Every structure is written in structure tokens, then in C-alpha cells.
Amino acid sequence: MRTMTDDQRTAQILDGKALSAQMRRSMAAEVAELTQRHGRAPGLAVILVGEDPASQVYVRNKTSGCEKMGVASFSHHLPAETSQQHLLGLISELNADPKVDGILVQLPVPEHINPDSLIEAIDPGKDVDGFHPYNVGRLAARKPALRSCTPFGCMKLLEQTGEDLHGKVCVVVGASNIVGRPMALELLLAGATVTVTHKFTRDLQQHVERADIVVAAAGKQGLVKGEWIKPGAIVIDVGIHRLADGSLTGDVEFDVAAKRAAWITPVPGGVGPMTITMLLANTVTAFKAHVGE
Ligand code: NAD
């Protein structure tokens, strides 16, 4: 962890890039050892439907992350007009394929396809995104199995602060199935007192102002004002927005928030790198379960 050099800033940076690199190094060693012992590498199948440029970048990052770690990746890039039935058939084949430990469908999918039906068709033991209702339910029931990657990555970042989360007042901004909701469940599991805010929440400011930990995942650039941050709070910014000059920013007004918070994630270099790392970690976990470890 590095301390900010600007005297006016008090926050320490939660460096997701560094943590991610460190985790990937130790996972690569584990993958090499597992591969040798079991005679095959962990395998991740990635399904991409259509030509969405952002999705293509995400898929490339996921498959290259696999290769660097010695995880086998199986890419299925299908045309936008692919039918739901065809996709369900492919998922069923991958469920049965012994070389495949993890299956993910890159979202969003074209409008004629129901993403929930695809997610629910994935064998929960291969659901490395942690989106299947079985895995969400396991987390809700305090028996986590495969955990949603972005919230899981946020928890690893929170661990870096060394803070005990029991009884901490946490406010999650956003309640989506892939970030806000599982994030709230992770924090609850860690013993925090959790408030989930969403687009119908009145007076977001008063919720954020009393939070020891703020997780911002609304997908609204600069929604969380720096002045709202309680001095000494921990701020995790999940939001990603590309500005006109090509640079990236988040849901939190970073410069002001960094003068008040004790810890803060930057965008880029905070939560983003952790998401793919946790996907790889889930693939290794699924592999171990499949080989009986
Ligand atoms: P989403 O659009 O599915 O959900 C947004 C949520 O925010 C909804 O629950 C909505 O009710 C809530 N919301 C909207 N306005 C609000 C307001 N004024 N106050 C409180 N809540 C409000 O988005 P998502 O898929 O959850 O993604 C959220 C953000 O996180 C996006 O910027 C996305 O790009 C980013 N993201 C980053 C990563 C990563 O790896 N860093 C991963 C997933 C998503």
C-alpha cells in the first residue's frame, strides 16, 4: 500500500493492481502444481455473443489472464443472431465437458436472448461469475460457494485495510444483481451493519455521511460527492466511466473524497483489476472441487 504524496490528502490508496498481481503470482504457482498433479489444467469457457466492443475487450482480458496463469481458456464467440436454444445447447455441452471447470457468459447479450435463462442453465459448480441463484443463495445463507467476482474482489481490498468489519456501518450505493446485492451479502457475512441504497432511495447523502465504509456501484459518474464522506471512512469505487479524453473515472468524486477518507480505491487500478483475478480464483476453486480436493 502506498501513502499519497499530496500533503492535503489523507487517504491511503487501496491498490487493486498491486494486490491483483500478487494474487495472480501465487495462483499461477498453485495452478502449475495442480496441473502437474492432476494431468490437466483448470479450464474456463467464455461465451461471447455479438460484436459489442467493450465486451470484446473484457473477454480478451479474461482469456489472456487465463493464459498467463496457466488456466486453459475455451472461447466461443458467436454471431449476434445466435438463438437462445443454440446457446442453451452449448451451455449443456460445456456443463458435461470434463475439461471445463468454469463457464461464463459475457453480459450484456443481444435483446432477443434472456440472460437469466442462460445463467440458470449453467451448472452451479461451474458458475465462476457467481451469478446463478444457487450461488447467490449460498452467500445469502452464509455458506458461500462460488462468489460474485466484483464484490469478492472488493472484500479482498477491504482485507488490505486490516480493519475489523464487525459492526461497521456500510452503505452500498446500487442494488444490481451483479454488484450491489451480492456486495451487501458479503458485508453482512463479514458482520457489518449494511444499508443498500438504489434509484428509489431518498436522500442518498444522509446515508453516505454516516458510513464507515462506502461501496459505490450505481454506474453514475461522480454521484457520491467527496464532501459526503465521513472523515476516516473507507471508500470502494466500483463505477467505471470513460471520459471524452479516453481516461477513466468512477462514481465517487475522488479528489475531494481522498482528502477525507482513510482508504480509497482509485479508478482505474482499484476494483477493476480485482474482478478478473477473482474470476481466475473461482476457476481454480471450481477445478479443485471437480478433482475432489
Ligand atoms: P446497474 O445499472 O445494473 O445497476 C445500478 C444500480 O444503481 C441499480 O440498482 C440502481 O437502482 C442504482 N442507482 C441508480 N441511481 C442511483 C442513485 N442515484 N442512488 C443510489 N443508487 C442508484 O449497474 P451495475 O452493473 O451494477 O454496475 C454499476 C457500475 O459498476 C457501472 O459503472 C459499471 O461499469 C461498474 N462495474 C464495474 C466492475 C468492475 O470490475 N470494476 C464490474 C461490474 C460493474
Image (cartoon, rainbow, N blue to C red):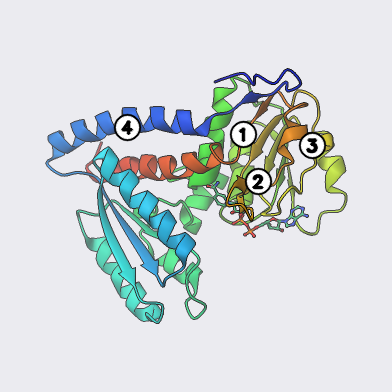
> Can residue 37 be seen from the camera position used here?
yes
Marks 2 and 1, how far apart at CA = 10 Å
Q: Quadrant of residue 168?
A: top right
For the point 46% across and 68% down, the residue is 52
The image quadrant where one finds the C terminus is top left
Residue at the disc numbered 1: 265
Q: Which residue is mark 3?
A: 226
Q: Which residue is mark 4?
A: 27
Residue 250's disc is 2
Q: In the image, what residue type sits under mark 3?
A: Gly
Measure the alpha-carbon separation of dots 2 and 4: 28 Å
Left or right: where 30 falls relative to 6:
left
Amino acid carrying label 4: it is: Met
**Mark 2 or mark 4, earlier in chain:** 4
SS type, badge 1: loop
Marks 3 and 1 in Cβ contact (< 8 Å): no
